[in-house]
Image (cartoon, rainbow, N blue to C red):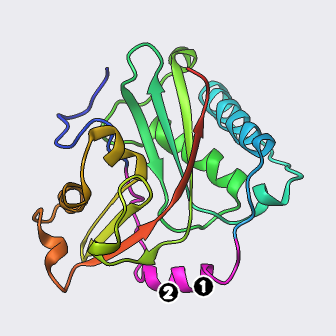
Amino acid sequence: MPQRSPQRFPPDDKRVDDNPPADPSADAAADSHAALLALSQEDKRTLLHIARRTLETFLAQGKHLDLEVASPALRQVRAVFVTLWRRDSGELRGCRGESVARRPLAEAVAHMTIASALDDPRFLPISLPETPLLRIDINALTPLQPILPSEVEVGRHGLMVMRRPHAGLLLPDVAVRLGWDRVQLLDAVCEKAGLPRRAWREPETELYGFESEEWGEEE
């Protein structure tokens, strides 16, 4: 698999956005007043279709899709991650996302699909002939909320840790897939941020939790 540099972290590590929020708690407080609209199965299929068409159209023509969606759930502003996997090996090929909602959901999926294909610094950019070999997964996130280490539940919570200038994020499924317990997850997200593994025990380290709804194309 094309790589730009050796991976220091597990290959199914998830990237946080390059510009984490200055004050995630402020974003969380603002977002918490608006209930998230539930995504139907049709909404999820539509988002996968948008991701697939975006990947193929942008790599072939360098053009963005003209997105028109009818579902209110797809027009809500929500943070997403898009992950690209090799169908044959199950290996990660690219993953990018945002920890804080900045765009309508359909637009965010399209934006992060392009970023995952072309702007994950761990890998070489994806080429058009490679697209049929890839499987797309989408994670739609709930707003970040401050969380205590004792409140973290493996399999339910993803985590973001911050201690300026460091920040790192792991989605909920990573700990389950790698068989981590709560302490291992907390250690790992600190390592992801470039902090000492037990930095979550220190009062100057900020810890945020979120939940995520994940779905993807068939194997």
- Which residue bears the numbered disc 1? 30
The 10 Å Cα crowd at callout 1, few under 14, some 14 to 19, many 20 or more, is few
The number of discs equals 2
**Circle 2 sits in a helix, a strand or a loop, which is it?**
helix
- The boundaries of the magenta stretch are 15-35
Q: Out of 102 and 205, give the one closest to the viewer.
A: 205
**Circle 1 sits in a helix, a strand or a loop, which is it?**
helix
Q: Is residue 18 magenta?
A: yes
**Residue 143's quadrant in the figure?**
bottom right
Q: Position of residue 106 (x, y in %)?
A: 72, 51
Q: Is residue 37 magenta?
A: no
Residue shown at 15% from the left, 76% from the top: 201
Tag of residue 26: 2
Q: Position of residue 219 (x, y in %)?
A: 55, 20
**Is the stretch drawn in magenta largely helix, strand or loop?**
loop
The answer to whether the residue labelled 2 contacts the one labelled 1, judged by CB atoms less than 8 Å apart, is yes
Residue shown at 12% from the left, 62% from the top: 197
Instruction: Name above or below for residue 157 compared with residue 34.
Output: above
**Residue 8's quadrant in the figure?**
top left
Name the residue type under label 2.
Ala
Q: Position of residue 144 (x, y in %)?
A: 48, 72
Name the residue type under label 1.
Ala
Q: Out of 115 and 81, give the one closest to the viewer.
A: 81
The 10 Å Cα crowd at callout 2, few under 14, some 14 to 19, many 20 or more, is few
Mark 2–mark 1 Cα distance, whole angstroms, equals 6 Å
